[in-house]
């Protein structure tokens, strides 16, 4: 290859190509006229118009011209660089030029799609083309840098999404660290009885995955642990994990639970988190029968030994020679190196007390959907019986939908799962109690596979549906049949009047919210949040599990409310994205990074706090700012702010930008 | 503590028992009340629905007088006055047209209004400024064993729920509990009493009053405590008509300040308790008084 054309030296020989993009550009912009205009500009050796520049023949055209006409600069006027800059750079490189001797002009989104007057649109295309031809003269050959990717992955959150992502990666032979802050993995799904719309048992499909991830040779499972610090960048993250003391040595405990039986608390006394407070546990406990790991945990807030130091420690005697209980355990900080991170931290349920008119916390027989879920589960606090607080079976029940969803006063979004979840619970309710069940809804949203059919099944099974947002739940009676009941007051918007419907039990379909500490997690992993607090994906359609931080992916409900199939689909997608990076082995960094002309830097440090990616540090010995190009995203903030002008940016050099401006003004 | 005081027409007429109990209770708690000089009717809800601009002028005159009286907040015991004065305040702030009309009218009467005086309800002042603890300390005759249904009515929580929660106000509940009374769970605490419909459309208005009375009885309350003269009147004065229409629901309705006065050891007659159509049953004798026969006999409210 001729070195003068590779490095772009010698006499300027620019090739210009304007794309019709079918009718997208060609119907508004007079492409041959633009090509004709550019052909007369100084330094232009070739100027052509073509129907589809991104097609193989289009790209071949560029490569052939580079060879035939000894081009050393290429300009393509077509669509957005987001779409095809990479395509044309590659074509230029295959033609034998450095790929950065290329400039792209967007005359589709910026011109033909937004203008209706062909003459003016054509004039604009000429001006933009002139600017690019002017600019490309000052392009320099640049090299992309390659950074190796550490092959291990961190998965944060051990719900169904995190478990699935960890298993997928582990099965592909990747080493995974799965970190969960609760004593057991399983998340919300572990609390469910059955899953909609198939009504298959949640535990039966979840627990095999839980034990599989625990015993997987490639997965390191850390429960009762939290990520506290994340440093580095894509491919090279250094993560600090805090492992909370569970006062039980995980490897020695066999889960025999003798210690629980012998605890000085003879009866369970404290609200059981897994049963959402419907049952009690002791200070030493196993979260639930299928917990993974099957290892007891000691609640430091409740255990007398941990809290006061004064206790007979009967648990130690019960454990005897196994010596699994260890009150000397301390919090541990562990550092791990990973290349990619998958965030699957899940959601919080809406606190029904925030809507006082529904009487949650006031009337004992107003329960939330997750409480009912625990009641219908055979391993739940009532052994699978739905009973009122007085022990009797309810004869009537009302489900109130959209509690903390689609509500301007609380949360505006639809939580997506509550319609289906409530219909599932309503069917189970009928099955367990033969009660009359009414669902109060605004709209039934059953769009998933098999979901509309499930709605139909609910109707056929005699579940009644009343359309209207419930005004209030009260216990005052107007008629004899209301005595002793909870009364739902609602405007039936289909019948067109206000109704009072007495029932024995009320189930509030509480919506999903971002986790209470979602903002802390967001900052920890340098992610973005939407206005509602869900973690923001890079693109809602084209990059649904990527974030704006490379190498950090999101899956499951931390990104927004979704059901189990969607969570698992996202988890698989996030795992695949991570694998794509790992198997590539390295990542290429765009060379449009900033760089510091060291001799001109005065060491004023004003750029350091401005960098959103913490890419700039300070060399105390030299008293100069130092830029880590692997972290730099090329946003240009430091370049613009540097008082001495000593920070510059590849592809955005002063002479390039000024000549581009000159070009557009000179038309 | 010092407040300007706007009694409103009710407290000088049908609701005079409210004033009769409010003034001594406030005095006992060390609160000075300065009654506005030459105050006028607030316009009530009726004028607001006829001509909002002119109604605001009527109400704003009182606000202007309050500003002249001093920098202290204005106490308005009647819920309707409280709402109308606050609404006038908001309207003058939010709507230039009303603001201009008000200023023009006040200028003609050599008055001015700047919007500096806060309009406050006794519940707000007693709960937030005086405090439950200070009230508890003044109790000499705890209302132990007295079951009270706390009834707030609609106007202090709708549309402006400024000092308490709109759906489940609790300030009166907590004050009554501090007096030693047993506060009954009363989910109708902010439901409408029927207001002026008791006179104009009795079938609808009285039914609302009946529901309130019947539910208080059903929940075992001995007495309903209210904070509004119209509520008190509706729940107290129409018992015979209500009984004729829907059956018995006999229970006394008194002002919360009357219960405070009783707990502070004041004379029932001084508190205006003799004015009720349905009188409140006398308080049960306290154990200490049974042991000590020399102590004064309990006032018999049925007699006074």
Image (cartoon, rainbow, N blue to C red):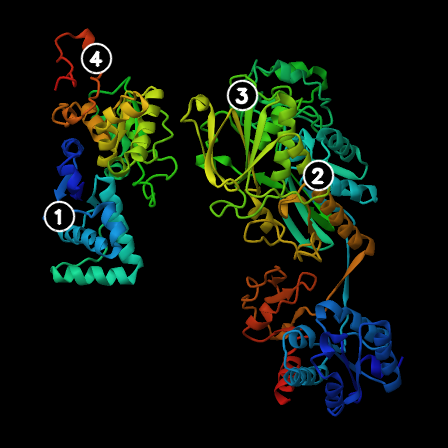
Q: Secondary structure at mark 1?
A: loop
Q: Quadrant of residue A322?
A: top right
Q: Secondary structure at mark 3?
A: loop
Q: Secondary structure at mark 2?
A: helix
Residue in the picture at 63% in, 74% down: A114
Residue in the picture at 19% in, 22% down: B279
Question: How busy is the neighbourhood of tag 2: few (under 14 within 10 Å), some, or many (20 plus)?
Answer: some
- Specify which label sits upstream in the sequence, 2 or 3: 3
Could you confirm whether marks 4 and 3 are on the same chain? no
The residue at which mark 4 appears reads as B285
Q: Nearer the viewer, mark 4 or mark 3?
A: 3
The N terminus of chain A, quarter of image: bottom right
The residue at which mark 1 appears reads as B39
Q: Nearer the viewer, mark 2 or mark 1?
A: 2
Q: Position of residue A600 (x, y in %)?
A: 60, 75
Residue in front for this viewpoint, A324 or A85: A85
Horizontal side of A466 relative to B212 (left or right) equals right
| Residue A426 badge | none
The residue at which mark 2 appears reads as A453
Q: Specify the subunit that label 4 lies on.
A: B
**How far is the residue under mark 2 from the one under mark 3?**
31 Å
Q: Nearer the viewer, mark 4 or mark 1?
A: 1
Q: Quadrant of residue A603?
A: bottom right
**How far is the residue under mark 4 from the one under mark 1?**
43 Å
**How far is the residue under mark 1 from the one under mark 3?**
57 Å
């Amino acid at each position: 290859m001729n070195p003068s054309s590779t490095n772009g030296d010698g006499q300027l020989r620019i090739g210009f190509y304007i794309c019709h993009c079918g009718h997208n550009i060609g119907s508004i912009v007079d492409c041959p006229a633009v090509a004709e205009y550019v052909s007369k500009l100084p330094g232009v050796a070739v100027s052509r118009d073509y129907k589809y520049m991104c097609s193989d023949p289009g790209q071949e055209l560029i490569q052939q011209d580079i060879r035939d006409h000894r081009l050393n600069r290429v300009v393509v006027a077509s669509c957005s660089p987001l779409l095809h800059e990479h395509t044309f750079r590659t074509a230029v490189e295959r033609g034998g030029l450095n790929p950065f001797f290329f400039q792209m002009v967007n005359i589709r989104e910026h011109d033909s799609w937004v203008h209706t007057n062909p003459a003016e649109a054509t004039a604009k295309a000429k001006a933009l083309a002139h600017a690019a031809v002017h600019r490309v003269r000052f392009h320099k050959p640049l090299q992309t840098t390659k950074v190796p990717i550490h092959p291990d992955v961190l998965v944060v959150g051990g719900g169904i999404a995190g478990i699935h992502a960890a298993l997928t990666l582990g099965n592909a032979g990747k080493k995974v660290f799965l970190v969960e802050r609760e004593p057991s993995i399983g998340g919300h799904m572990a609390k469910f009885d059955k899953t909609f719309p198939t009504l298959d048992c949640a535990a039966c499909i979840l627990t095999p995955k839980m034990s599989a991830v625990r015993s997987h040779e490639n997965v390191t499972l850390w429960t009762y642990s939290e990520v506290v610090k994340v440093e580095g960048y894509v491919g090279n993250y250094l993560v600090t994990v805090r492992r909370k003391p569970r006062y039980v040595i995980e490897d020695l405990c066999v889960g025999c639970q003798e210690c629980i039986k012998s605890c000085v608390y003879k009866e369970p006394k404290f609200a059981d988190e897994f049963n959402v407070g419907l049952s009690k546990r002791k200070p030493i406990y196993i979260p639930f029968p299928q917990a993974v790991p099957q290892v007891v945990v000691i609640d430091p807030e409740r255990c007398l030994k941990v809290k006061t130091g004064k206790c007979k420690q009967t648990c130690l005697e019960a454990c005897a020679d196994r010596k699994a209980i260890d009150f000397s355990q301390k919090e541990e900080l562990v550092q791990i190196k990973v290349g990619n991170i998958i965030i699957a931290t899940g959601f919080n349920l809406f606190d029904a007390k925030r809507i006082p008119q529904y009487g949650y916390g006031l009337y004992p027989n107003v329960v939330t959907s997750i409480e009912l879920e625990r009641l219908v589960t055979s391993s739940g606090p009532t052994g699978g019986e739905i009973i009122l607080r007085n022990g009797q079976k309810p004869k009537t029940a009302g489900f109130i939908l959209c509690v903390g969803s689609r509500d301007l006063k609380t949360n505006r979004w639809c939580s997506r799962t509550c319609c289906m979840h409530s219909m599932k619970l309503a069917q189970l309710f009928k099955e367990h109690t033969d009660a009359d069940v009414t669902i109060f809804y605004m709209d039934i949203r059953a769009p998933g596979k098999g979901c509309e059919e499930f709605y139909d099944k609910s109707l056929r099974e005699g579940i009644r549906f009343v359309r209207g947002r419930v005004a209030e739940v009260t216990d005052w009676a107007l008629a004899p049949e209301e005595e002793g009941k909870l009364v739902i007051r609602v405007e039936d918007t289909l019948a067109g009047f206000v109704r009072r419907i007495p029932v024995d039990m009320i189930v509030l379909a509480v919506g999903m919210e971002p986790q209470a500490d979602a903002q802390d997690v967001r900052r920890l992993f340098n992610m973005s949040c939407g206005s509602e607090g869900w973690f923001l994906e890079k693109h809602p359609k084209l990059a649904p599990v990527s974030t704006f931080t490379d190498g950090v992916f999101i899956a499951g409900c931390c990104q927004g409310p979704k059901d189990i199939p969607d969570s698992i689909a996202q988890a698989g997608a996030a795992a695949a994205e991570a694998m794509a990076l790992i198997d590539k082995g390295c990542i290429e960094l765009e060379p449009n990074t900033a760089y510091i002309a060291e001799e001109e830097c005065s060491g004023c440090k004003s750029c350091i706090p401005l960098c959103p990616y913490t890419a700039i540090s300070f060399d105390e010995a030299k008293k100069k700012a130092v830029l880590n190009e692997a972290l730099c995203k090329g946003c240009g903030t430091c370049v613009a702010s540097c008082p001495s002008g000593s920070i510059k940016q590849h592809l955005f050099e002063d002479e390039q930008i000024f000549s581009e401006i000159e070009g557009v003004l000179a038309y | 503590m010092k407040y300007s005081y706007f009694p409103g027409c009710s407290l000088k007429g049908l609701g005079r028992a409210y004033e009769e109990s409010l003034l001594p209770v406030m005095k006992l708690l060390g609160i000075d009340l300065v009654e506005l000089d030459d105050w006028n009717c607030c316009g009530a809800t009726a004028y607001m629905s006829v001509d909002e601009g002119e109604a605001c002028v009527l109400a704003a005159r009182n606000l202007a007088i309050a500003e002249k009286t001093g920098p202290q907040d204005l106490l308005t015991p009647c819920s309707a006055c409280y709402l109308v004065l606050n609404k006038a305040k908001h309207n003058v702030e939010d709507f230039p047209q009303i603001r201009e009309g008000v200023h023009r009218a006040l200028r003609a009467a050599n008055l001015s209004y700047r919007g500096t005086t806060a309009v406050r309800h006794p519940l707000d002042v007693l709960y937030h400024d005086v405090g439950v603890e200070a009230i508890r300390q003044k109790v000499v005759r705890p209302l132990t064993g007295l079951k009270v249904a706390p009834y707030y009515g609609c106007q202090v929580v709708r549309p402006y729920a400024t000092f308490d929660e709109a759906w489940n106000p609790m300030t009166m509940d907590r004050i009554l509990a501090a007096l030693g009374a047993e506060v009954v769970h009363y989910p109708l605490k902010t439901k409408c009493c029927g207001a002026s419909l008791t006179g104009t459309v009795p079938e609808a208005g009285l039914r609302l009053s009946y529901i309130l009375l019947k539910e208080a009885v059903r929940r075992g309350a001995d007495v309903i405590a209210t904070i509004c003269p119209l509520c008190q009147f509706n729940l107290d004065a129409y018992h015979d008509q209500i009984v004729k229409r829907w059956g018995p629901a006999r229970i006394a309705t008194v002002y919360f300040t009357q219960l405070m006065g009783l707990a502070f050891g004041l004379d029932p007659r001084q508190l205006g308790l003799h004015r009720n159509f349905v009188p409140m049953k006398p308080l049960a004798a306290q154990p200490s008084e049974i042991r000590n026969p020399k102590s004064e006999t309990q006032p018999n409210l049925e007699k006074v």
